[in-house]
């Protein structure tokens, strides 16, 4: 348990009163990340994880259902996303034959808005992290 406490203390960054910059936690070890004698106040591991999680795009997946007609799905793709007829039909056929299709990708918030719009049109849609 002491090891966990040391790791938490090692990686913990406490904001100052104004909330604009991190304050180093005091440490008895020199050269310890976050100690006053350390040249780096942020962990490179945390920076990489944060950057990589923000860089990963999200995708909107539309799923096949037995209710909506194929022409209606094409209409939704053309109306909402502005796809040309050929692209909308290609995506609709993927939904029909494969059971699903990725119809958009981008930031998570945008994909959540698109998923809600697809639900409003009566289509089944979900979002997921894009697999690199």
Image (cartoon, rainbow, N blue to C red):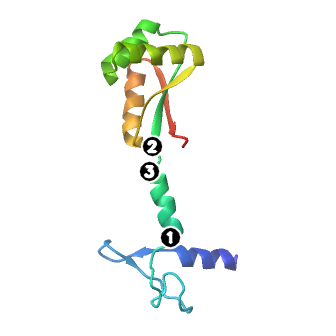
- Tell which of 40 and 29 is nearer to you: 40
Residue 83 percent location from the top left of the image: 34, 20
Q: Is residue 118 left or right of residue 128?
A: left
Circle 2 Cα neighbour tier, 10 Å, few/some/many (<14 / 14–19 / ≥20): some
Q: Is residue 129 above or below residue 85?
A: below
**Residue at 54% of width from left, 13% of height from top?**
96
- From the image, tell me which residue sits under label 1: 44
Picture coordinates of residue 89, whole percent (x, y): 43, 13
Q: Secondary structure at mark 1?
A: helix
Q: Which residue is mark 2?
A: 57
Which residue is the extreme one toward the front?
Answer: 86
At 45% from the left edge and 58% from the top edge, which residue is drawn?
51
N-terminal of the pair, mark 3 or mark 1, is 1
Q: Residue 18: image x %, image y %?
A: 29, 74
- SS assignment at label 3: helix
Work out whether residue 90 or residue 64 is closer to the camera in this orientation and state it. Answer: 90
Q: Can you tell which mark lies on residue 123?
A: none
Query: From this viewpoint, which residue is outermost toward the right?
Result: 1
Q: Which residue is mark 3?
A: 55
Which residue is rendered at x = 47% and y = 59% of the image?
Answer: 50
Residue 2 location, quadrant:
bottom right
Vertically, is 61 above or below 132? Answer: above
Q: Secondary structure at mark 2?
A: loop
Q: Are marks 3 and 1 in contact (CB under 8 Å)?
A: no
């Amino acid at each position: 348990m002491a090891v966990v406490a040391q790791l938490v203390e090692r990686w913990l960054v406490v904001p100052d009163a104004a909330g604009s910059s991190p304050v180093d936690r005091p440490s008895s070890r020199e050269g310890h990340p976050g100690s006053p004698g350390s040249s780096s106040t942020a962990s490179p591991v945390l920076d990489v994880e944060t950057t990589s999680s923000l860089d990963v795009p999200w995708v909107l997946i539309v799923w096949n259902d037995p209710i909506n007609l194929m022409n209606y799905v094409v209409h939704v793709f053309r109306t909402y996303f502005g796809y040309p007829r050929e692209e909308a039909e290609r995506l609709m056929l993927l939904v029909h034959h494969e059971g699903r299709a990725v119809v958009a990708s981008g930031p998570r918030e945008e994909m959540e808005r698109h998923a809600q719009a697809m639900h409003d049109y009566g289509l089944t849609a979900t979002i997921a992290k894009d697999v690199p």
